[in-house]
Image (cartoon, grey):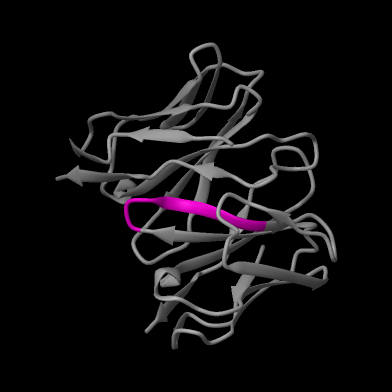
């Protein structure tokens, strides 16, 4: 059974803080993704990675960076958190196989005050 | 980049009736179209997907149709049941053989099944 875990379910940070969101998958998936989910906007892709140390920008990368030092771990970094980054953040992973399902983690609800 | 429009935003149907959710996409290079279901407080889960070389796919009470010329695809749920109540998201992506490069999602449809 695929398991994608995220380091925190809820996180409260102050404006200007550096924030790390961690995602770990245990199924040896090559592809990993970070999305944010906001009411009425659906899910939007921030960054993805198809291999260790590789990263690709998604649709809304501004204000975020990522790190993939190990195959099973993909980190999302907010260099200087702002209130408009208050959101639900979802990590996902998949095999690098055509049409393979993306498996999502439980999400981290981040509040920036 | 890709843009996916999804309608309606809310859909209320009587239990046992059918539900249809429609999506359009803009990038003619998109070739992979999954549908995800998200129950309240839970993570999105794939329920069905279709590739651009197929016009229709069925899995029990769920079917998806794709019109590549018109760039639209639809989710059909027949004989709806209370457990079908959830938010449904369509998505589109280019899949060049190594998995989707990241999905562009529609804004979601809140499906309500009335008893």
Residue B74, compared with residue A16, is above or below; it is above
What secondary structure characterizes most of the magenta part? strand
In the shown orientation, is residue A63 left or right of residue B42? Answer: right
Identity of the residue drawn at 77% across and 34% down: B96
Q: Is residue A7 magenta?
A: no
Q: Is residue A46 magenta?
A: yes
Residue A2, compared with residue A19, is above or below; it is above
Determine which quarter of the picture holds residue B41. bottom left
Determine which quarter of the picture holds residue A60. bottom right
Residue B28, compared with residue B101, is above or below; it is above
Total marks in image: 0
Quarter of the rendering occupied by the N terminus of chain B: top right
Give residue B53's position: percent from left, percent from top: 66, 18
In the shown orientation, is residue A73 left or right of residue B102? Answer: right
Residue range corresponding to the magenta coloring = A39-47
Give residue B56's position: percent from left, percent from top: 53, 19
In the shown orientation, is residue A86 left or right of residue B110? Answer: right
Give residue A9's position: percent from left, percent from top: 48, 80
Residue B96, compared with residue B84, is above or below; it is above
Please, which residue is most extreme toward the top here?
B69
Taking depth in this image into account, of B62 and B111 the one nearest to the observer is B111
Identity of the residue drawn at 23% across and 34% down: B16
């Amino acid at each position: 059974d695929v398991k994608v875990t995220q380091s925190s379910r809820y996180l409260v940070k102050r404006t200007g803080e550096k924030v790390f969101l961690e995602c770990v998958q245990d199924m040896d998936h090559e592809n990993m993704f970070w999305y944010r989910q906001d009411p009425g906007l659906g899910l939007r892709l921030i960054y993805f990675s198809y291999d260790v140390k590789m990263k690709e920008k998604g649709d809304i990368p501004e204000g975020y960076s990522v790190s993939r030092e190990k195959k099973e771990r993909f980190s999302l970094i907010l260099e200087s958190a702002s209130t408009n980054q208050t959101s639900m953040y979802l990590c996902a992973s998949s095999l690098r196989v055509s049409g393979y399902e993306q498996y999502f983690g439980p999400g981290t609800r981040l509040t920036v005050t | 980049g890709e843009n996916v429009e999804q309608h309606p935003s809310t859909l209320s149907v009587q239990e046992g009736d059918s539900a249809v959710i429609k999506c359009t996409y803009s990038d003619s290079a998109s070739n992979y179209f999954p549908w995800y279901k998200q129950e309240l407080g839970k993570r999105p889960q794939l329920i069905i997907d279709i590739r651009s070389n197929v016009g229709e796919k069925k899995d029990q009470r769920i079917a998806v149709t794709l019109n590549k010329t018109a760039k639209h695809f639809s989710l059909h749920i027949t004989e709806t049941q209370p457990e079908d109540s959830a938010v449904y998201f369509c998505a589109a992506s280019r899949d060049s053989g190594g998995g989707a490069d990241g999905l562009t999602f529609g804004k979601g449809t809140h499906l309500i099944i009335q008893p």
